[in-house]
Image (cartoon, rainbow, N blue to C red):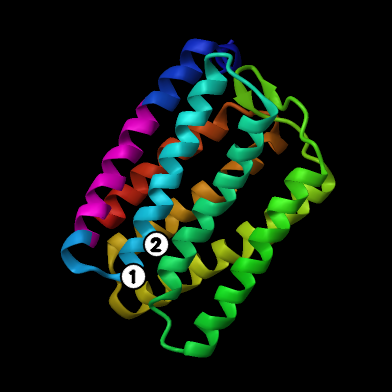
Amino acid sequence: MAFEILTSQFAVEATVIITLLLTLGLAAVISQRYLKKRSLSLLFWSSGIWLFVIGMFQELLFAVGVYSSLLINSYLFIVALLVEALALGSIQLVKSNNIRNGYYVFVVLSTLLLAYSLVASPVGNIITDWIVYGNLPLFVALTSSLVTFPAAIVLAGVAIKGYLKTRSRKLLSIITGVIIVSIAGTLYIVQYPAFLYIAEFVGILALWYGFI
């Protein structure tokens, strides 16, 4: 019964709309900070959150029954890019130019490979119970992981290092939010695809606390 409620169209739409509004507010706040400080980290972080906004809007379209191959391909690309953009913001805090430049090269190559995989391996209809849920072509799954896993490691690594230095609860909240958002897509493993959007909601709340 509880699962049926979670996967009802109304529940999915309500969760996505609330998360979208929270994400939109966070994107606006971080963008305002960037305009004041002109920090490269804030530029990438705000870009990542704006990509999150776009992704949430696409999830809302899926929830109301709008679907096309172009829409799902752009969604999968954006979801990977948003994690990458957040990681690019964090990598600015690393002092080594070699590490930063090496990651830049990796980002370009892995992103191009992801784009190619989405063109070369058509993605079918992976919407179930109004939710993005389904098996991706192996090539797309591998290239998506190639983009997101290293990005998540960069995000968590830089945040953990900062937390160990400062013991800041806000950094700890950012770590939590990043981890939740990064692994949200794997929740289908336990056969509760609706928890994908619940995880996004919890993750964005944690990021709110961390960035504000």
Which residue is rendered at x = 28% and y = 76% of the image?
Answer: 166
Q: Quadrant of residue 147?
A: bottom right
Q: Which residues are magenta?
A: 18-34
Which residue is rendered at x = 43% and y = 24% of the image?
Answer: 15
Q: Main secondary structure of the magenta part?
A: helix
Q: Could you tell me if the residues under marks 2 and 1 are in contact, i.e. CB atoms within 8 Å?
A: yes
Front residue of this view, candidates 115 and 2? 115
Indicate the quadrant containing the C terminus: top left, top right, bottom left or bottom right.
bottom left
Could you say where residue 13 lies in the image, as x and y percent from the top left? 46, 18
Could you say where residue 75 lies in the image, as x and y percent from the top left? 59, 38
Indicate the quadrant containing the N terminus: top left, top right, bottom left or bottom right.
top right
Q: Quadrant of residue 57?
A: top left
User: Quick check: 151 above or below 6?
Assistant: below
| Residue with the mark numbered 2 | 44
Q: Disc 2 versus disc 1: distance between alpha carbons? A: 6 Å
Q: Is residue 28 magenta?
A: yes
Q: Is residue 208 magenta?
A: no
Which residue is rendered at x = 68% and y = 20% of the image?
Answer: 128
The kind of residue on which mark 2 rests is: Phe
Label 1: how many Cα within 10 Å (few below 14, some 14–19, many 20+): some
Q: Quadrant of residue 26?
A: top left
Tell me the tag on residue 40.
Answer: 1
Q: Secondary structure at mark 2?
A: helix
